[in-house]
Amino acid sequence: MSAGTIVLVGTVLFAVGCSTGGSGLRDGGPAHTDQVARTAKPSQDADTAPVPPGNAPASASGSPIKKVDAVALLKADPKVSPAVKRDLKPCTGKEYPIDVSYGKVTGGGSVDVVVNVLSCADALGLGSYVYRADGGKYENVFTDEQSPVYAEIDRGDLMLIKQVYGKGDALAYPSGEDVITYRWSGEKFTEQDRVHTEYSNVVDGGGQPAPALTQKN
């Protein structure tokens, strides 16, 4: 991943995705689909979905993390656009193109959930969402559907990765990349830092990007 190594604090990653062969943020879009798990049956809650029972992985502190039905959260969430919901279908069988991260990113005592929706064809990030635990339910506190986009948890902050494409850029070789860091202010996420990286395509006859020039705003 060109944005650097992402350190997850108290997180457990699982991906419910199609086998698209996505292998990094600059290879077929900002998607991670190399780990696969199955989702539970969607909830009928109109706004949020409860945490389903069952075995849960342990966090870094040893406490169990309750896995959520991410597909149900997205489908029941009015903040998720109709276009994303329309594309939220299994790629193969019952495997949905979504990545789910668990970690504390809103400063509360409960574990938050970061969900990324990808495209089946090229693993391109279609939307990123953050859900904050509210009792037995989850509240959407962050939404970005300006594709391509991918969100991750970085040492308690929310990191948003956006690839920048110029005219004629191939999907695997964008012109650049923006990495935006958000921090929870108590009520919402506010931007803390933004790094823009521009890539040169002069190496290998333009077939491979050269080392990048990074600018920090």
Image (tube, rainbow, N blue to C red):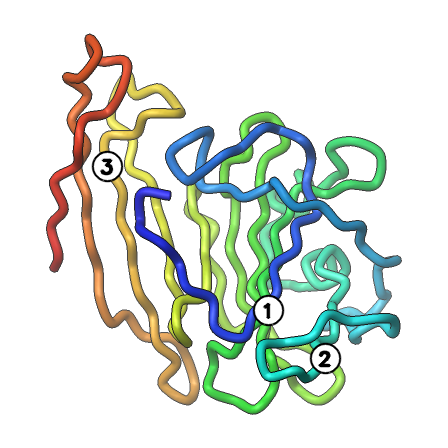
Q: Is residue 155 left or right of residue 196?
A: right
Q: Which residue is mark 2?
A: 64
Q: Could you say whether the residue bearing mark 1 is in a helix, strand or loop? A: strand
> In the structure shown, which secondary structural element does the residue marked by tag 3 occupy?
strand
Residue that label 3 marks: 176
Q: Amino acid at mark 1?
A: Tyr
Which mark's residue is nearer the viewer, 1 or 2? 2
The image quarter containing residue 208 is top left
Residue 46 shown left or right of residue 138 in the figure: right
Task: Give the mark nearer the N terminus: 3 vs 1.
Answer: 1
Tag 3: amino acid? Gly
Q: Residue at horizontal 73%, vertical 43%?
A: 96
Q: Quadrant of residue 132?
A: bottom right
Can you say whether 2 is above or below 199 in the image? below
Mark 3 neighbour class, 10 Å CA radius: few under 14, some 14 to 19, many 20 or more: many
Q: Residue at x 73, y 70 (%)?
A: 57
Which residue has dot 1 on it? 102
Residue positioned most to the top: 205
Q: Residues within 10 Å of mark 2 (few under 14, many from 20)?
A: few
Of residue 149 and residue 66, the one placed in the foreground of this image is 66
Q: Secondary structure at mark 2?
A: loop
The reply to whether residue 47 is visible in this rendering is no
C-alpha distance separating marks 1 and 2: 11 Å
Task: Give amino acid for label 2.
Answer: Pro
Report if the CB atoms under discs 2 and 3 are less than 8 Å apart. no
